Amino acid sequence: MTGGVLFDGHLDLAWNAQLGRDLTLDLVALRAQDPVAGQTAGVSFPELRRAGVAACFGTLFACPASDDYPQGYEQDGRDDWKGARRQALWQLDQYRRWQDDGLVRLLTTAGEVSAHLRDWDAGAPGPLGVVLLMEGADPMRSADDLDFWVRAGVRLVGPAWGRTRYAGGTDAPGPLTERGVELLTAMRESGVTLDVSHLDDAAWEEALRLQPKVVATHANSRAFVPGNRHLSDGMAGAVVERGGVIGLVALSTFIRAGWDEGDARVELREWAAHARHYGETFGWAHVGLGTDLDGGFGVEKAPAGVDRYLDVERLASFLPPEAWDGVRGGNWARWAGEHL
């Protein structure tokens, strides 16, 4: 692959379908009947194809219950995996239905990813290639469930989102739990990659000791935005030392410290500053996209000028020309070809 196509490290496609969005529609039509209020959609299958997105890590994301999402699963201790599992199974089935309809191709091996991207790069684009990523491990009753999800196609797991039964996460500090240690051990033995995005600092060191195959599918730099959602330089360096790639998130609150709704949208150059920090500190071969577009926020919270997925290409104007092919897809493609 020459880097001519785009590979996004983090898209919540089935999650959006679970919210009622019909991603088969052109973006204009989707917006006209969008059931998600207050979040202007930027992603649909026709839009991704128009933007040249050949592949992505597509999530199985089970959302805990909240005021904004009362239908989510209850984090009530022993049995909270049941509701989370129902959400993840529905999403898994959605990806399979999309595959039956020729809209996606589920990819499970390095060879499948490489062949899929070669076709796209040669000018013969097919369906969107999707490698399944479980974001937050609560759909698993225990580490014993990992084998089921691996057989279903999951190749990356992020143990945390907020706090889960496996680890502390975003705005929910805590170490790996006993279940988390068992899961990370099982992941290492099964060759499943650890996604450290959302993982709290207290869980970090032990997680990396247990699992050498590591990426950060969507994590900006703590050098610009404090908080446990983002990577310190030490964390980013640890991902890079293990051959991993770090995906850049297109959410304004993750780009500029203190940004809030009602503020002017951040500038593309500010998003690019995160990329430059990673690239100049750790090498451009380890920087990719993990836009998370439509992952719980609309384009109102994306950088100015990113009004639909097609506009992600505008980031290129603020990066070294020689780095862009790798950032937009080549680095994730290389990683998948070597580690999946």
Image: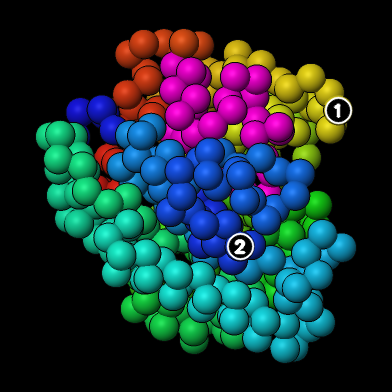
Residue located 78% across and 83% down the image: 77
Magenta highlight range:
288-316
Quick check: can you spot residue 153?
A: yes
Residue located 20% across and 57% down the image: 112
Q: Amino acid at mark 2?
A: Gly
Q: Amino acid at mark 1?
A: Gly
Q: Position of residue 126 (x, y in %)?
A: 22, 48
Q: Quadrant of residue 110?
A: bottom left
Q: Is residue 131 left or right of residue 157?
A: left
Tag 1 or tag 2, which sits nearer the N-term? 2
Residue located 37% across and 76% down the image: 152
Q: Secondary structure at mark 1?
A: loop
**Mark 2 highlights which residue?**
20
Q: Are marks 2 and 1 in contact (CB under 8 Å)?
A: no
**Mark 1 highlights which residue?**
262
Q: Position of residue 80 (x, y in %)?
A: 72, 82
Residue located 59% across and 28% down the image: 307
